[in-house]
Image: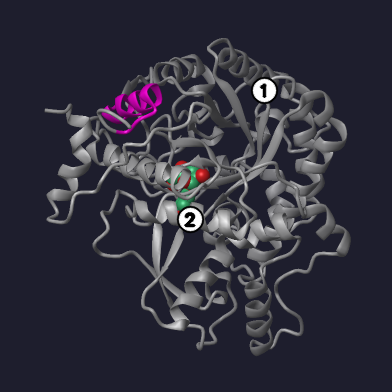
Amino acid sequence: MPPLWIVVGCLQVLLKWTTCQEISTLTFPDSFLFGAATSAYQIEGAWNEDGKGESRWDYIVHNTNFILDGSTGDVACDSYHKYQDDIAALKELGVNYYRFSISWPRLLPNGFANEVNPAGIEYYNNLIDGLLAEGIEPWVTMYHWDIPNLIYYLGSWNNAEIVDYITELADLAFQHFGDRVKTWITINEPLTFCAHFPNATVTLYGQTVPVGITEYLCGHNVLRAHTKIYRLYQLKYKNSQGGRISLALNAEYGIPETDSEEDIAAAKRKMDFELGWFLNPLVYGDYPRTMIDYIRNYSALQGYPVTRLPIFTLTERVQIKGAYDFIAINHYTSAIISDNSSLVLDASYENDDGLDAKKDPSWEGSAASWLAVYPEGFRQLLVYIKENYNDPEIAVTEQGYADEPDTINDTRRINYYQTYLSEALKAIHEDGVKLTAYTAWSLLDNFEWNSGYSVRFGLYHVDFEDDNRTRTPKESAEFYKKVIATRCLVDSCD
Ligand code: PNW
């Protein structure tokens, strides 16, 4: 009888009377890296301690009803004080790296570089040194949504000046941490904060904003900011520090609902509107053809004199093209796609793609409504990137499963990781995808944005009732630890 963690994947599926998912017996290459991720606002707490400035999220949780369970990230996992517990958990897992983010207002309390908070520099120095002492590489995200509130008041990502402001933050980070940090992510999931939830950090909460405009302005400024930071590093730091940089993009895989030409084209359009929006400029120097055409056509039909999608200058195109050292992907779920492009609706990113998306009812759900389990889509996405974007090196910078609070015996999460990692193995060995790293989201249960603490992603349980914020490994932590140690998903590998 194999240990329980090996058979749960099958049991879970058997219970639903479908076929048992076959888990790959291949192994992860020796050079393959495993990691775990968090982000500053979701774990740090200490929201107003030691000179930290106010972020937009601090404002939101204190002044709006946006958070479903009324909670805040004021304390969160208290990682500002308990980062050594986080390092201990990472060490126990045996990960090669830890992906965390720096809080912009902790380093620059007002958002601007005229005033640097020394306690912020010290905090991240301690965290980085503590990780390195345990042989864990720091992978640092510069912007994981906690924009300084004052910069938000200037228009957030709608204001092109943000390109210079965030480049000042990046320069500071390279200066202070770049001797030890060799993998940088500039910005996390622009699709999510520009298009899916612009209310959270980009547009004025509760006010009417010009949708159909703000999403693309935001995305445009994200691409310019990323590019400026990338080029700054190349000119000023790359020689001496030797690190690498990317932008973390989230993408679902789109499966056509039927074999009709229209649905097949709609599924491809989903890939262009979500992934290609950012990846096409990075790889080819401009937005995808479908985005340019669809937004121009709808804009004209809606009476706009020019297209709502901004246009890059020639200089910008030259600088954006190639501004990455690897591709960083956050992937959780897939979607079934059908065409609805014949309708002309109100101007919005949501309508511009001319498609409908849904989850297949046969896919296992999760505690997050947007997350359903379809492991095959992960392999398909990796192959899609290989085939459409010049066979790049890919690092998965987030992947994970949402369940209910306080689930320690988290067999559904184990099933998720086991089946998704199995698809990663097939992509590596059978499809030749250059996948080199895999990051579990998340190391810890944490503040899940507008869901507060009602939805959990952690490999480690955090007791939010207890002042100590005690971390306890869930069964999935044991599973992941074993995968890292054996580089294998089943009892014995080929
Ligand atoms: C990512 N969706 O966000 C973020 O990078 C993390 O901070 C977050 O905790 C994690 O995934 C889990 O949600 C997403 O609605 C938020 O499709 C929402 C969606 C996708 C990703």
Boundaries of the magenta span: 474-489
The crowding category of the residue bearing disc 1, from other C-alpha atoms within 10 Å (few below 14, some 14 to 19, many at least 20), is: many
* Left or right of residue 439: residue 237: right
Name the spot of residue 215 as percent of width and height, x first: 63, 64
Q: Nearer the viewer, residue 425 or 377?
A: 425
Q: Is residue 478 magenta?
A: yes
* Residue 363 image position (x, y, % from top left): 27, 58
The residue labelled by disc 1 is 120
Q: Tell me the CA gap for discs 2 and 1.
A: 38 Å
Q: Is mark 2 within 8 Å of ligand 1?
A: no
Residue ID at (28%, 37%): 414
Residue 165 belongs to the span the image colors magenta:
no
Query: Is residue 383 or residue 38 the one in the foreground?
Result: 383
CB at mark 1 closer than 8 A to ligand 1? Answer: no
Upstream in sequence: badge 2 or badge 1? 1
Which quadrant is home to the N terminus? Answer: top left
> Label 1 amino acid?
Gly
Query: Magenta stretch: dominant SS?
Result: helix
From the image, tell me which residue sits under label 2: 381
